[in-house]
Amino acid sequence: MYKITVIPGDGTGPEVIREGLKVLEAVSKKYNFKYETSIFDYGAERYLKTGKTLEDRDIEELRNYSAIYLGAIGHPDVKPGILETGILLKLRFSLDQYINLRPVRLYNAKFCPLKDKRPEDVDFVVVRENSEGLYKGMGEFKDKGTGDEVAIQISYNTRKGVERCIRYAFEYCRRRNKKRKLTLCGKTNVLTYAWDLWQRTFDEVAKEYPDIATDYAHVDATTMWFVKNPEWFDVIVTDNMFGDIITDLGAMIQGGMGIAAGGNINPEGISMFEPIGGSAPKYTGKNVINPLAAICALGMMLENLGEVKAAEAVENAVIKAVTKKLKSLAAGKMGYSTSAVGDLVVKYLD
Ligand code: IPM
Ligand code: MN
């Protein structure tokens, strides 16, 4: 019996989560597993009413669950940073979800903005470090508000934090068993402390994985290769900030935010799965947002829970919807409403 925390959150979050839960119900019947969900109202509305984001005792409550399924966090009436750090990043950090796993997979060449790229050319996974780096929030102002102001933001990298991430990436690459190639994406030519540690750790850990080919690319060059030769990549490991940036580009080359999903993973604890697109305020409540990213995130959650067959069924159903029916992956242009896309996925489950 899986106990799943559901946080629909803000904007279009509730609409896409509703479709994900529809698919979960259907797939659980087909593959004979049981689950229960508890819905939590963390998000902008609650914050605007109570001034509360997410408290330590909320986190303690979440520790009783098998996984978290999250819609979106962020609202135009709340100053940027409050909900993101108070809810999303707080969840990632306090549950030590130190991996952000972001598959970049093109399901239908028609939806790729790159010329002449086929599904087999855009098929890689970014392993983003999810607990350190610039996201640690370390820094200070000096002489704030004066002409001599200095703002310092520190990238905090520990040997242990870097090593567990790199090790996860090697293991993942081996398990994935495709090109068996791991690329370190960094900036060793400028960020000579942080990336020296990453490169040294990468080279040391690589010795334990002689079956995995290794490669290095600077982050700026990585964005170029994503556009020019995405087929070169298999698994990429990188830090928190670079991972954030390159996975938005990754989302675009796989067809857009409507299809891009991610998992915040604690391999020894509670993981959280989410569409990576955000709350899309302008589409809220219109039944036009694409729920496939949330449905793909559900698939990742099932795989993580050990329901591998059910996870495959969800992904295959998404592939069918995307290759046979949808006119576009963009909100309002799919040729189907949000709920009709959820129905299509349910129909294609086998
Ligand atoms: C993401 C988002 C978050 C991040 C924001 C909303 C804090 O952009 O999941 O990629 O920067 O990690
Ligand atoms: Mn991001």
Image (spheres, rainbow, N blue to C red):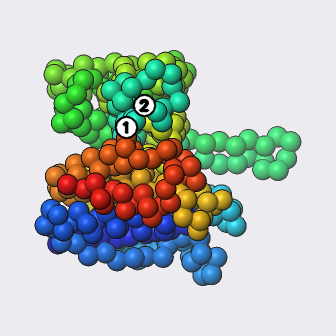
- Determine the CA span between mark 1 and mark 2: 7 Å
Q: Mark 1 points at which residue?
A: 107
Q: Mark 2 points at which residue?
A: 109
From what the image shows, is residue 153 above or below residue 94?
above
Position of residue 339 in the picture relative to residue 345 (left or right): right
Q: Nearer the viewer, residue 49 or 54?
A: 49
Residue 229 shows up from this direction: yes
Q: Which image quarter is the N terminus in?
A: bottom left
Look at label 1 and name its amino acid. Tyr
Residue 173: % across, % down: 24, 32
From what the image shows, is residue 203 above or below residue 149?
above
The residue carrying pointer 2 sits among few (fewer than 14), some (14 to 19) or many (20 or more) residues within 10 Å by Cα, namely many
Residue 200: % across, % down: 34, 24
Position of residue 220 in the picture relative to residue 229 (left or right): right
Q: Which residue is drawn at 49% across and 68% down?
A: 14
Q: Which of 7 and 252 is in front in this view?
A: 252
Q: Which of 208 and 311 is in front in this view?
A: 311
